Image (cartoon, coloured by chain):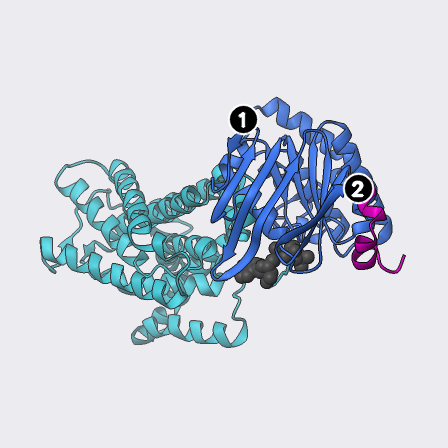
């Protein structure tokens, strides 16, 4: 029964990767930019949630919503200030800018509050539920539930709402989207807002689950979520979900088998394998339009 | 309705349109014919706001629209069916049509117009849930036209609708262009297929390397020796 326990842990970790990976993949889908500052938005979400819970003494859900809202705004500001003017620049210029934004965010946070870690307050009752003889912590269940709700919400926005359809249209063909009357700039901002809000949610969830946060906490999960997005097929929303969950489970299984030192390496091995075997990822699109 | 006055358009250093003037009156079908690279698509892109003219004015219903953003122009009633159809390939036929009505909020009207498009192109109705990238070239052309019509345009810009299609399909597409025009939409039609274009147009312009070199009624151009030699050759 211990492996079920491990599976649950893997899914919890994978949920966090998946939520971050969604932002990577959506932004890449629409402006073909790997937003390396995305992991830092995740970190900001964790800190916003921390201050909301510890200082303002509000509950988990209000803190989650505040973190998502502020991260959405931060995401839009990053896009408008740093990336917008680079729309027609080379990919490498945009990529270097993204790395610069990432370092800037990390150092601004360190400047204002120092580099020391913070212990996340216990905001949720730590109980465990016994399912079929397996003890599963209530936090794991909550994380999974929040992730599922957010993913359903995202699917709804992307497929059923006007802004979601505009997002898909712009990512397929920006000029044709303009001809429909779609405001491409606003649509790109909306994509950043949604992706950053999901990263913010992941940050709060991470804090509650792992209870320790610090200003550089976004680097490794950010990188791994990026790998998860590539694994799922960069640009594909279902790909990011499946990629994130798979990576979480693989890492946990690798640790559980006694190779915990190899845990971080697993992600990079997956990246190398996917780049060799199927660079477009599992949900990657190979379809070409008919002309 | 539309009056283009002495516009110049550049791609970086490339001077793609040189002092181009042209006029489209309400209710007309006007065609612009020219060889590859003459500047036909560039002109349509300038009219729909994808490109900005460096010089000159574009008057639409007595309003200067040259250089305005595309969404403002669509809102004013100009829809552009781009070269190569440019349908949103992974989205369904129905979603493509919905995007055509992006700036409209009248649910009932949109529903009605969608039904009209399905009546005009029954094959689109049969394929409404299918990803548009799986349609044939002719079907994609129909979808691109239906999508543009969903914006309820007063002026429809068509860029080479016959490109790459079998003669029978081309004939059908042209019949529909005529029908749309008879229902009250003014049409500016860009074509390399001069024969077909002149057969349905009221007036025509000929463009060569970024300059308008000839204009007149469709009949005049059909009989012009210059046009016969350059564009109606082999017939
Ligand atoms: N994006 C671009 N950048 C630079 N030059 C361009 C660009 N698009 C078009 N041109 C140039 O502008 C000129 C006019 O091109 P345009 O596409 O308007 O021609 P066209 O008449 O539509 O040709 P076709 O019949 O092949 O579609 C050509 O010389 C072309 O090479
Ligand atoms: Mg062209």
* Figure colour of chain B: blue
Q: Secondary structure at mark 1?
A: loop
| Quarter containing the C terminus of chain A | bottom right
**Please, is residue A234 above or below residue A59 in the view?**
below
Could one spot residue B101 in this view of the protein? Answer: yes
**Please, is residue A158 above or below residue A22 in the view?**
above
Disc number lying in front (2 or 1)? 2
Mark 2–mark 1 Cα distance, whole angstroms, equals 39 Å
Q: Is residue B227 magenta?
A: yes
Q: Is mark 1 within 8 Å of ligand 2?
A: no
Label 2 sits on residue: B218
Task: Give the mark nearer the N terminus: 2 vs 1.
Answer: 1
| Chain with cyan colouring | A
**Labels 2 and 1 share a subunit:** yes
Quick check: B112 left or right of A157?
A: right
**Depth check: A105 or B165 in front?**
B165
The magenta region covers B217-235
| Quarter containing the N terminus of chain A | bottom left
Q: Is residue A275 magenta?
A: no
Q: Secondary structure at mark 2?
A: helix
**Residue name at image x 21 percent, y 53 percent:** A211
Q: Residue B105 has which mark?
A: 1
Quick check: B215 left or right of A263?
A: right
């Amino acid at each position: 029964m211990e492996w079920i326990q491990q599976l649950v842990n893997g899914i919890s970790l994978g949920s966090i990767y998946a939520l971050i990976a969604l932002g990577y993949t959506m932004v890449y889908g629409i402006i073909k930019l790997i937003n390396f500052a995305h992991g830092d938005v995740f970190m900001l979400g964790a800190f916003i949630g921390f201050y909301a819970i510890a200082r303002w003494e509000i509950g988990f859900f209000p803190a989650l919503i505040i973190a998502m809202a502020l991260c959405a705004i931060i995401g839009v500001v990053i896009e408008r200030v740093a990336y917008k003017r680079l729309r027609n620049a080379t990919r490498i210029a945009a990529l270097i800018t993204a790395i610069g934004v990432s370092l800037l965010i990390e150092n601004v946070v360190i400047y204002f509050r120092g580099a020391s870690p913070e212990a996340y307050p216990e905001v949720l009752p730590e109980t465990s539920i016994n399912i079929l003889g397996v003890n599963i912590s209530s936090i794991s269940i909550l994380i999974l539930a929040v992730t599922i709700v957010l993913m359903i919400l995202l699917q709804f926005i992307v497929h059923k709402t006007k802004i979601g359809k505009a997002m898909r249209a712009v990512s397929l063909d920006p000029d044709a989207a303009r001809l429909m009357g779609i405001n491409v700039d606003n649509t790109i901002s909306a994509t950043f807002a949604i992706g950053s809000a999901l990263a913010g949610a992941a940050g709060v969830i991470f804090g509650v689950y792992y209870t320790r946060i610090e200003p550089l906490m976004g680097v490794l999960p950010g990188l791994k979520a990026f790998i998860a997005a590539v694994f799922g097929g960069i640009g594909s929303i279902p790909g990011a979900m499946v990629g994130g969950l798979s990576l979480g489970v693989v890492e946990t299984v690798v640790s559980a088998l006694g190779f915990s030192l190899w845990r971080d390496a697993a992600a990079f091995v997956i990246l190398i394998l996917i780049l060799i075997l199927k660079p477009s990822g599992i949900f990657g699109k190979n379809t070409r339009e008919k002309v | 309705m539309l009056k283009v006055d002495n516009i110049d358009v550049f791609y970086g250093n490339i001077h793609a349109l040189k002092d181009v003037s042209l006029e489209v009156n309400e209710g007309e079908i006007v065609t612009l014919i020219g060889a590859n690279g003459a500047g036909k698509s560039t002109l349509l892109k300038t009219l729909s706001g994808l490109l900005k003219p460096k010089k000159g004015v574009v008057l639409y219903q007595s309003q200067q629209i040259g250089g305005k953003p595309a969404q403002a122009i669509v809102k004013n009633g100009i829809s552009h069916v781009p070269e190569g159809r440019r349908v949103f390939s992974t989205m369904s036929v129905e979603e493509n049509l919905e995007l055509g009505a992006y700036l409209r909020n009248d649910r009932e009207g949109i529903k009605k117009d969608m039904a009209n498009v399905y009546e005009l192109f029954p094959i689109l109705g049969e394929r409404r849930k299918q990803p548009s990238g799986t349609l044939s070239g002719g079907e994609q052309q129909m979808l691109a036209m239906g999508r543009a019509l969903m914006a309820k345009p007063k002026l429809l810009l068509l860029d080479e609708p016959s490109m790459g299609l079998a003669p029978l399909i081309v004939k059908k597409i042209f019949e529909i262009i005529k029908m749309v025009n008879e229902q009250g939409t003014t049409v500016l039609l860009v074509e390399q297929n001069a024969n077909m274009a002149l057969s349905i147009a009221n007036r025509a312009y000929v463009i060569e390397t970024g300059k308008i070199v000839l204009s007149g009624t469709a009949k005049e151009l059909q009989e012009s020796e210059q046009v016969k030699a350059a564009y109606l050759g082999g017939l």
